[in-house]
Image (cartoon, rainbow, N blue to C red):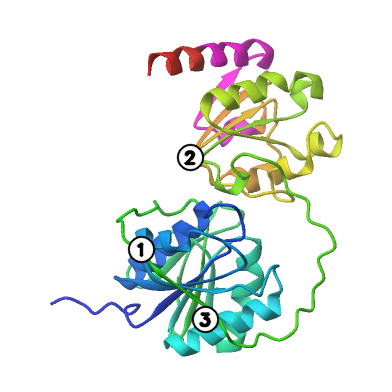
Amino acid sequence: MTRPNPFAMSTIVFIDTRGEKLPKAAQEAVTFASQLAGGSVTAVTFGDAQGLENLGAQGAAKVIVARNVKHVDGQQLTRLVADVAAKEGADTIVCVHDATGKTVAPRVAARLKAGHVAGVTALPEGGLFRRNVFSGKARAFVEVTSPVKVLSLMPNSIAIANSGGSATVEEYSGDLGAARITVKEVRKAGTGVPLPEAERVVSGGRGLKGPENWGMIEELARELGATTACSRPVADMHWRPHHEHVGQTGVAIRPNLYIAIGISGAIQHLAGVNQSKVIVVINNDPEAPFFKAADYGIVGDAFQVVPKLIEAAKKLNAER
């Protein structure tokens, strides 16, 4: 006897698509919501994003976009999601566990008197949602018993589906009220893949001795198709921009590959990177704490090891 899918009634997914292309995390969230529902879902977004019909490949039948909302205003976006949920009769709302999702998901849960699970990392097992706790050192399994559920998905947790198809795009016409946030300036972090979306990351610490030595980090990242990052002391000393700082007080990442070069592995740094699928540590101190969390470790001078890795990566790329 096949058990009914408790999420099959109506599922919507709220995503931030303000960038020039559809974010990887948004595509993951739509994929997750569709797999959770066992069918097509409705996506809700805002801003001037183009190409929204392409979310049909991840399982969205319809995309509702509020064009008049340009920035993250928690109150406006909460009204948007709650209104669409009511009109669609949604009993499950999925968000991305990013800055925007963290702003909206708890507010929506409070407004709808819904159970909220933040940082879900997989499809439910036996009706239980898995999430990481204690800075990733343990897992919790959460049951939601409320009629309406609000879930936020950790980026890089679900493989993106690509089944083809196209979603219809509708413009939201409701009244979300006046914006209460004024944006005076927007500073973009730069080009390339954003750290939360990167599948490979090459990161450097104080062991590189100065910003003048960062060329080999950038070269290795380039050969590996990776994004560069750094530890907090490096950002604090202005060797690298602060948007590259990963760790508990910086950007939390979950790449498939994280290479830490000249980073000791303080607990604050580990808290932001220990969900990486494979961690490689290069350090000349065999007692560096990072080696305890590493899948692979190289005890050696970064200025000798990294050039050899670059040479090997170039050779591998030339053979492809």
Q: Nearer the viewer, mark 3 or mark 2?
A: 2
Amino acid bearing label 1 = Ser
Question: The residue tagged with tag 3: helix, strand or loop?
Answer: strand
The image position of residue 160, as x and y in percent, is: 39, 53
Residue under numbered circle 1: 166
Note whether 83 is above or below 281 in the view shown. below
Number of disc labels: 3
Q: Nearer the viewer, mark 1 or mark 3?
A: 1
Note whether 1 is above or below 239 in the view shown. below
Residue under numbered circle 3: 115
| Quadrant (top left, top right, bottom left, bottom right) of the C terminus | top left
Q: Would you say residue 26 is visible in this rendering?
A: yes
- How many residues crowd mark 1 within 10 Å: few (<14), some (14–19), many (20+)? some
Magenta-drawn segment: 290-311
Amino acid bearing label 3 = Gly
Measured Cα–Cα span from mark 3 to mark 2: 30 Å
Q: Nearer the viewer, mark 1 or mark 2?
A: 1
Question: The residue tagged with tag 2: helix, strand or loop?
Answer: loop
**Looking at the image, is mark 3 or mark 2 earlier in the sequence?**
3
The image position of residue 48, as x and y in percent, is: 61, 64
Task: Specify whether 46 is left or right of 160.
Answer: right
The image position of residue 29, as x and y in percent, is: 46, 62
- How many residues crowd mark 2 within 10 Å: few (<14), some (14–19), many (20+)? some
Amino acid bearing label 2 = Asn
Measured Cα–Cα span from mark 1 to mark 2: 29 Å
Residue under numbered circle 2: 256
- How many residues crowd mark 3 within 10 Å: few (<14), some (14–19), many (20+)? some
Q: Residue at the location (62% across, 76% down)? A: 106
Q: Name the residue nearer the viewer: 218 or 97.
A: 218
